[in-house]
Amino acid sequence: MSEVFDFSDVHTFCPNSKDSNLSFTLGSRVDMYFLQRKRSRISAPFIAGKKSKMQSSIEALPDECLFEILRRLPRGRETNACACVSKRWLMLLSSMKKDEMCTSETTRFVGPEIQSNPPKPKEDDDVSRGYLSRCLEGKKATDVRLAAIAVGTASRGGLGKLSIRGSNETRGPTNLGLKAISRGCPSLRALSLWDVSPVGDEGLCEIASACHSLEDIQFFHCPNITDKGLVAIAKNCPNLTSVAVESCLNIGNESLQALGNYCPDLKFVSIKNCPLVGDKGIASLFSSVGHVLTRAKLQTLNISDVSLAVIGHYGTAMIDLTLVGLQNVSEKGFWLMGKGHGLRKLKSLTVTSCPGVSDLGLESLGKGCPDIKTLALRKCPRVSDNGVVSFARAAESLESLRLEECHVITQRGVFGILANCGKKLKAIVLVNCLGNRDLGFRFPLTSRCRSLRSLTIRNCPGFGDAGLGGLGKICPNLTHVDLSGNKEITDACILPLVESSEDGLVEVKLSGCDKLTDNTVTVIAKLHGDTLDLLKLDGCRCVTDASLIEIASNCMVLSELDVSRCGITDSGIKVLAEAVQMSLLTFSIAGCSLVSDESLPFLVELGKTMVGLNVQYCGGITSGAVDLLVDQLWRCDILS
């Protein structure tokens, strides 16, 4: 603190004010003030030329004088140390702009004497890079902490990313906290605000005026932020590349127009649940920066067919497009988006809860997006077999297809996709599609889909012997199979699919298939033990120790095994532990009521290679045994 006092004139001190009455001279007999190691409990001004019984304190100085003192501190440890003295000093330091901090020293106090030839000052650190990242959540999100971040990061590379999640109801962050960040963190590149209701346009305008390097902004549930704040950021931060706005009820078309006009490098935009955003804003945004915009997500907005037509025409750089909950978009909108021929670079399309998408629109999109590789349809009640087959036939580059809660699609549609997808389809996912039932038709074996590697059919109760058997015959190169949640699947259903895999199964997920027995596990272990890496049998109650014996004997490379809620006992775990070739990384026996403390030494043996062990709801394993596991398997995460 010897460098605190630094004035160009030793005999006159003026605290940066036009009022000459604030100036005073230092007489020859004035008592000098020396900084103490501890703050005085009594804060009162001293009287020049007289001795006082009360200790003097720098806290008696007004803010103007203290400001002049603090701004002369070298940036770094001295500044951080002073910020720890009191909240008053911290807030004063955080309110200083970079150009208000002194960069040279001509005279300063060192002890009781005046040094006339001080050493050369250290060069100002480069704080424009913005390497540091800070996240404040819940009660930790206050103006005081923001001020401390602004002061503390200035000399450590500069703050690059700031995230504030959830406001403190009593002392939450306000515009004052953002003002401190703007003053002390001009290198800020990413700002994220979640549920910060006290922050409004005033704070954003402060950020916009100082943090011109902003590239990424996220505003979620911020009701006091309006178009004024976002427009200010758009005008002053031309380097913006990513913008996400969710549930900001006062942000509308004006903000999107400003982003389109002033942010030429914008590549990602996500707008969700903003009722003031309409066709005018979306059209203006895409017509201005559609040639560089590569990713967009539009969810729960009051837009119509016009917006989709504009996207289809101007989105020439679009690679990833997500449309969710667009209730006012009709069949015509999706048809126009495909007919615009502007989405020829689109590779991923996700449509969820959009009642307007139909077979006609889907076929148009397939023709207008020839390079699309991933399609996901969720809760689209008007899409039928004809639509998905037409899309698969038109989109020759399709590699992944996901259908969720599309109840009109049947097994005819699934097999039609496999027959018309060309040679690039690698994964197909069916989730909660109640229309997929065995229809008893025969599919020609000449139409095989050898490119398909991953098959997922979850919670589709209609798939039975005929459906799975047919899939096994026309998809001989499967390596990943997920049939979780299909309670009606039996050994007879799945064995043809398992036996037809020519390249060897790598991942098999059968959770919730409670009718499967040891026969299925035995076949999987014997046929695919050399390639099997993951096996999930959670809830398969008919699986017993016999399955663990086959797994221990045949599965050489298995790293993840889940036999939760199965009929295994201590004997089965012992067999696994004795298998020399076993090197499990994660093992779950949650809910296995027949497992007891006798398995403790076997679990310890298996745990030598494991990073995760789940023994939750195992009634036979006592808390003492769990404590021993925790002590001996200290490298392993144990759920108990």
Image: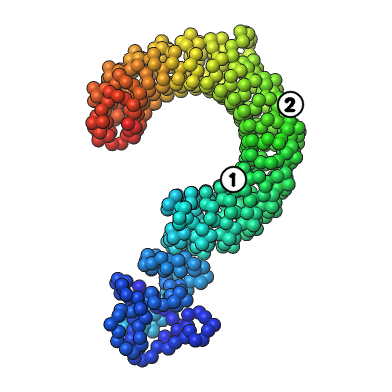
Q: Residue at x 49, y 68 (%)?
A: 96
Camera-side residue: 233 or 435?
Answer: 435
Q: Which quadrant of the rendered structure holds the N terminus?
A: bottom left
For the residue marked with disc 2, what is the amino acid? Leu
- Label 1: how many residues lie within 10 Å, few (<14), some (14-19) or many (20+)? some
* Residue drawn at x 74%, y 37% as measured from the top left: 305
Q: Is residue 384 left or right of residue 34?
A: right
- Across and down, in percent, residue 630 comes to 27, 34
- In percent of width and height, residue 181 lies at 50, 60
Residue where numbered disc 1 is placed: 247
Instruction: Name which residue lies at 65% across and 27% down.
Output: 380
Spot occupied by residue 566 in the image (x, y as percentages of width and height): 37, 18
Evaluate whether residue 264 shows in this view: no
In depth, the one of 155 and 566 nearer the eye is 566
Q: Quadrant of residue 599?
A: top left
Q: Quadrant of the C terminus?
A: top left
Specify few, some or many for label 2: CA neighbours under 10 Å numbering under 14, 14-19, or 20 or more: some
| Numbered disc total | 2
